[in-house]
Amino acid sequence: MGTSSSWSFGRRVLEMTHATLTGESLLPDVNSQLFDGHVYDLNWDGNKANYEDIFDVSNLPTADFAKYLISSVKFHCGQLFYLFEEATFMERLEIFYRNPAKEAQISPLWFCHFLLILAFGKMFVIQSSRKHGPSGIEHFLQAMQCMPDFNFFKADPIEKIQVMCCGALYLHSTHNRLPAYRMIGTALRMALENGMYTEMRSSCLDEDHVQRCNLVWWTVYILERRMTSLLGLPIGISEESITAPYPSIPTRAQSSNVMEMQVILCQILAKVDATVYGTEGKLDSRYLSATQSVLRDIAKVTQRLNNSFDLYTNGSMSGTSRISAHLHILEHQCIILTTRPLLYIFLQSKLGQSDPALMVWLKSETVKTLLHICVESAQQILRILSSLLEQGILGMSTDRSTTSELFVLTYEEHFLPFDMDAASTSTISLLVAAAIDSSLLQDHSPWSQRAHKIFDQMVQRGNHAAKLVQSELKQLDGELAQLAMKEGVETVLTREPYSQSTGLGQFVEAVPLVTGSEQSPLDVELDEGFGQHYELSPNQMMDLANSLDLNSLSWPLSSIHDMSGLGM
């Protein structure tokens, strides 16, 4: 994993803490459990020759249930990604169900597309406890087996790319992230060879076709940028080479705004990877200037984000939409990713694995400001995710139009990977911040409780990846606490037990968050530390960026380790 990887950072922090505590490295089996392909057993080796009939239609749902599953995919993904064209897709569906066995072989690409959409639909609406994968995995595997060889298969390039996007997102959601990265890379190259990254100005091109190309291009772009950032790998095309206009859907202005906002935030994400971390992974004098530039970009987009996707409906987050939450979480992830290198170097120094003199940088107002905004963004992510969780719990006792709609609303966030990654990223940042300096965070246990409540819900819904991530976070929390006690350091890690629980950070073996009749942390009245109206205004963000003193630090470059551990 590369230096900016949001996947490897936690593992590297845990490895460093574990080595300091025990003098030994993590066991290989433990160290690899969260990496690619270790969460779900797909029970498939990629060999299509083992299957007699890849166009079998005997396990397909009825036409009515298929329509319901497709509608659930539209509900959850329609504003975020352009995975299928609804009108033409539903027309093909009607034709397909007249003679499924025949149509599957006549239209293999559409059949593959259909299976992938079914897989997503079942993932959203049917709870699964199966170890080999979420509901719908059988449709996904069949889609992979009957997927044409796109090197030779001639078909509509838009649909081919949509199929690849569906496959990549599903793999990403099931923690098969390297195959997902490879698949979205193929989709990107298909889009490039068809000129979708350009304005596509030509009298020979139909306006509707150009608009569809534009939507599928930005879908590929968003997925590719997020996956490359997660893995810490170079982007597939430079920003300077892209001339395609922002997505525009005349009949769906809200959807256009959502996708455009995602694009802008992903552009910032790419800039963070390229400038804050740099090509060599060195924390040097360029860091502050790159950070200042990124924060200014975030300030510019914050106004639009707050105006169009306000979190505080009627003065609180109780009515926050999934779309608004998704976008605000992405914004705060950009902030954390920008400021997180400082967390790593200070923890490294604190653990005695680099020059202890580096801790003097904590006295710098510039450094302290960046660390505080990192902590506040991590806290805000957990506030947003907690609000979504609370809405789901409250929704079970409210009157909805249909039971099925309620079930979809409470299930969606538990399998798409974005919320889980955000919860992990924010929790790790808070654990490390508390370990570094109590002035950054006096007591992280209330926030840890929030995070684990979120993970508990994901696990209960059958998300095995969330269970493993949660286990890793508990181990890190416990080992940081043990290390502090072992060294006799008077830090926040020797905190008193939190009033509503036994505290997660006091023991290596985690204790239940809520037992018997204990009150859930989410049900406790929010105190000042959980203030619900934390969102920096555009002016505050710009003032913060402008206040950074680029000459305030003397960077002892020879004493700084490279940032190969700064991922995540």
Image (cartoon, rainbow, N blue to C red):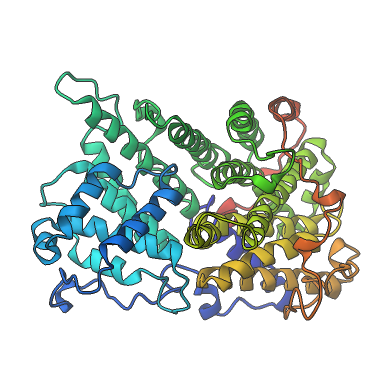
Residue 199 rendering spot, x and y as whole percentages: 29, 24
| Left/right of residue 272 with respect to residue 236 in the rendered view | right
Image quadrant where residue 100 sits: bottom left
Instruction: Look at the image and tell me in which quarter the C terminus lies.
Output: bottom right
Residue 38 rendering spot, x and y as whole percentages: 44, 74
Residue 28 rendering spot, x and y as whole percentages: 52, 78
Q: Nearer the viewer, residue 537 or 149?
A: 537
Q: Nearer the viewer, residue 324 or 144?
A: 324
- Say whether residue 352 is visible: no
Image quadrant where residue 207 sits: top left
Q: Nearer the viewer, residue 508 or 76?
A: 76
| Left/right of residue 544 with respect to residue 424 in the rendered view | right
| Left/right of residue 73 with respect to residue 549 in the rendered view | left
Does residue 302 lie above or below 13 as drawn?
A: above
Q: Residue at x 39, y 49 (%)?
A: 74
Q: Residue at x 19, y 50 (%)?
A: 92
Residue 88 rendering spot, x and y as whole percentages: 22, 43
